[in-house]
Image (cartoon, rainbow, N blue to C red):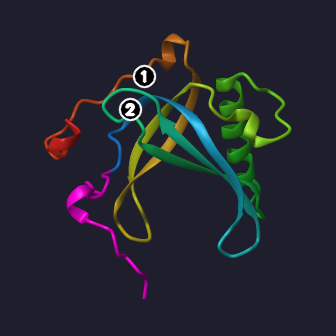
Amino acid sequence: MANLNGFDANTVEPSSTFDPLPAGKYLAAVTGTEMKATKDGTGSYLNVELTVLDGLFKDRKVWDRLCLNHPNAQAVKIARGNLSALCRAVGVLQPRDSVELHNIPLVITVKVKKREDTGELANEVRGYARKDTAAGKPQQAAPTDNTPPWRR
């Protein structure tokens, strides 16, 4: 049991569930990184937390997993390529620590995919670009019919 004496739900807005971001390009920044072990313990990945910086989805978060240590060489090759794109997008080409990639605006390309384990829709980061490149300009996605009214 936990003592909740003094809490009044009438004075606090309730949390809501978040649908995935619509596919598109977003101005964002890396706001957290952490190396984690894979579920089976055979490797590790860099968990990258990205926060949208402006627009309709400001302050929303998406994550990317860069599997930098894994028995599957192709998975490592893909992860290293994505890390290279991230580093180039923030202008830090030889980071010694992942914290050097934090809080530098960049443009991320986000896709929506169906999770294999649950069948739910989820976001996937599919690209990184410098915020000042013409090809990397964010195009905030317009609300769709299933966008909750409080997000419009």
Which residue is more in the foreground, 29 or 22? 29
Q: Earlier in the sequence, mark 2 or mark 1?
A: 2
Q: Which residues are magenta?
A: 1-19
Q: Say which residue appears at 16% left-offset and 47% top-offset.
A: 146
Q: Quadrant of residue 102?
A: top right
Q: Which quadrant would the N terminus be assigned to in this image?
A: bottom left
Mark 2 — residue? Answer: 24
Under mark 2, the amino acid is: Gly
Which residue is more in the foreground, 135 or 101? 101
Return the x and y of residue 30 as percentages of the image width and height.
Answer: 60, 37
Q: Say which residue appears at 76% left-offset and 71% top-offset.
A: 42
- Check contact, mark 2 vs mark 1: CB within 8 A: yes
**Residue 95: image tag:** none
**Residue 138: image tag:** 1
Q: Is residue 14 magenta?
A: yes
Q: Is residue 99 magenta?
A: no
Q: Say which residue appears at 77% left-offset and 56% top-offset.
A: 73
> Relative to 146, does residue 44 appear above or below in the rendering?
below
Return the x and y of residue 52 as percentages of the image width and height.
Answer: 45, 34
Which residue is more in the foreground, 107 or 7? 7
Q: Which quadrant would the C terminus be assigned to in this image?
A: top left
Q: Main secondary structure of the magenta part?
A: loop
